[in-house]
Image (cartoon, grey):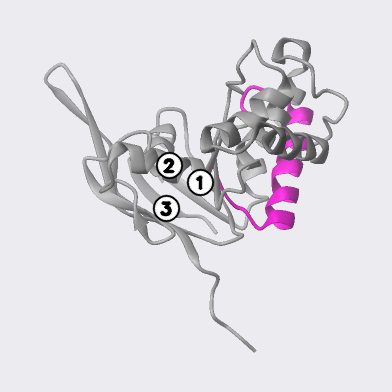
Amino acid sequence: MNSTPPELVLDARNISKSFHQGSKKIDVLSDVSLQLRAGQSMAVVGTSGAGKSTLMHILGGLDRPDSGEVLIEGQSLWTQSEAARGAMRNRTLGFVYQFHHLLPEFTALENVAMPLLIRGLAVAVARQKAADLLGRVGLEQRLDHKPGELSGGERQRAAVARALVGGPRVVLGDEPTGNLDERTAGSVYDLLLELNRELQTSLLLVTHDTRLAARMDRQLELRLGQIHTLT
C-alpha cells in the first residue's frame, strides 16, 4: 500500500504582515504557516478583522507579505516578476469572493470565458469550456444572462465556474457565501465540495461560519494574527 501523502500544492511559510495607522503599528499576521495538499479542502475561521482577507490576498499573490514566502507547486510566488506572478495566478489559482465581481456588461458565459481568453485560448474553445462548466454548476439555461438578471445564488455559482474554468490547482475563497442567505450559502458550499471531490482541485476558504467550515477536511483558526489548528 502506497502511504505517500498527496503532493503539496500550496505552502505558506512564516507569513507576517503589519499596517500603520498614523504612528501606530498594527500586526495583522504573525509568523503564519500552513500547507495545502492536492485535493484537500481547508477552512480558516476567525472573527471579523482577524486578518483572514489579508492572508488570502497574500496567498493569492495580490498583496506582498512583510516577511515569509508562499510556494505554489514548489515555486515561490513572491520572488517572481509581476508578469510571471500574474501568469502563475492565471494558471494555478482560482478565486471566489464574498461579492461575485462578475462584470455587469458581460453575460455569464462571457464572464466565465474571460480567464481563458486572457490566457490566450481561441474564443470558440474558451466559450465551449465556459459553457460546459456553467452546465456543471446548473446554469446551462442562463448562459446569455447578465449578472443583473441572475439571482444572488446564481451569480455566486457563475463566480465558482469562473474560478474553476482554467483548471486551477487551488481555489481560494474569501467568505464566498458571506453575502448569501443560509440556504443558498449551503448549496454553494455543496457545489464547491462536490467539485473539489470530482476535479481534485484543492480548496482553501476563509469564513466566519464555523458550521460550514466543519464540512472541510481541515479547520484552522486565525486568532490574534496566528494560526491555530482546530482539526
For badge 1, the amino acid type reads Arg
Rendered residue at 70%/39% (across/down) = 125
- x, y (%) of residue 155? 71, 23
- The residue that mark 3 highlights is 228
Q: Is residue 60 visible?
A: no
- x, y (%) of residue 212? 66, 42
Secondary structure beneath label 3: strand
Name the front one of labels 3 and 2. 2
The secondary structure making up most of the magenta span is helix
214 with respect to 187 (left or right): left
- The residue that mark 1 highlights is 91
Does the magenta portion include 180?
A: yes
The stretch in magenta equals 177-205
Q: Are marks 1 and 2 in contact (CB under 8 Å)?
A: yes
Nearer-the-camera pick, 154 or 218: 154
Residue 146 image-quadrant placement: top right
Q: Is residue 11 above or below residue 128?
A: below
Distance from the alpha carbon under mark 3 to that under mark 1? 30 Å
Residue 1 image-quadrant placement: bottom right
Q: Residues within 10 Å of mark 3 (few under 14, many from 20)?
A: some
Label at residue 74: none
Q: Residues within 10 Å of mark 2 (few under 14, many from 20)?
A: some
Secondary structure beneath label 2: helix
- x, y (%) of residue 223? 39, 42
85 with respect to 45 (left or right): left
Question: Given the current orientation, which residue lies at the most extreme left position?
Answer: 23
Nearer-the-camera pick, 160 or 211: 160
Q: Is residue 12 visible?
A: yes
Q: Residues within 10 Å of mark 1 (few under 14, many from 20)?
A: some
Does the magenta portion include 97?
A: no
Q: Is residue 215 above or below residue 172?
A: below
Label at residue 87: 2
